[in-house]
Amino acid sequence: MARTASYDRNAALETAMNLFWTKGYHATSLKDLEARLQMKPGSIYAAFKSKEALFRATLDRYAARMSAELEALIAASPTPLEALQTHLRSLAVIAPCDRPSTACMLVKSLLEAPQEDELRDFITAHLDRVETLIAAALNDAQRKGTLPETCDTGRLARRVQTYIFGLKVQAQRETDPDRMRDLCHDLADEIGRAAAA
């Protein structure tokens, strides 16, 4: 008879994700994971194979959630472009929230990963998928006539993604909520003008 897992995998992944998101991959020790997950080393390895495999699983979780939130916003908005502008404006919040950091976990992890490393490729692939999602939304807007045919949607997608991740980094250092709000609104408006050009 198969042995039933004595831990909640979803809860463990959520806890590990928040820990890695806060401390980073290298700074998170096995002792940190043991304490936070309330699991012994053997149980952690039995459940997740290795620290890196656990980290990858948390990145998958983070990226899937990020994509789902963006897809839901796009689906609920009058146009994809308005959805992206709304998302940019929503990044103005710098007050403490229910997340461990305003910075993007993928970007933080990319900055930590060494060049020419499989883990870096894994992180980059997730970032590429976010860009593809943005580009698909812009292509849809173009097909529906809300973006001009002359708009380079691939180029605009890279720009939007850069603004999104840049604003998440800026939120880590900005202390004035008015300045942060103005910046988010300025970039959202700029995307609108770029799309109309």
Image (spheres, helix red, strand yellow):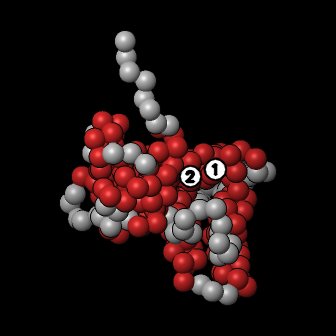
Residue that carries the numbered disc 2 in the rendered image: 66
Dividing the picture into quadrants, the one containing residue 123 is bottom left
Q: Residue type at mark 1?
A: Glu
Is residue 154 positioned above or below 165 on the image? above
Bin the neighbour count of mark 1 within 10 Å (Cα to Cα): few under 14, some 14-19, many 20 and up: few
Q: Percent from the top left, x then y, of residue 124?
A: 36, 56
Residue that carries the numbered disc 1 in the rendered image: 69
Residue 163 visible: no
Bin the neighbour count of mark 2 within 10 Å (Cα to Cα): few under 14, some 14-19, many 20 and up: few
- In 3D space, how far apart are the residues under numbered discs 1 and 2 (Cα atoms)? 5 Å
Q: Percent from the top left, x then y, of residue 45?
A: 29, 41
Q: How many marks?
A: 2
Q: Please name the residue shown 37% across and 59% down the image.
A: 32
Pick the front one: 78 or 29: 29
Q: Percent from the top left, x then y, of residue 76?
A: 76, 47
Q: Identify the mark at residue 162; answer none if there is no mark.
A: none
Query: Mark 1 and 2 residues: CB-CB less than 8 Å, in contact?
Result: yes
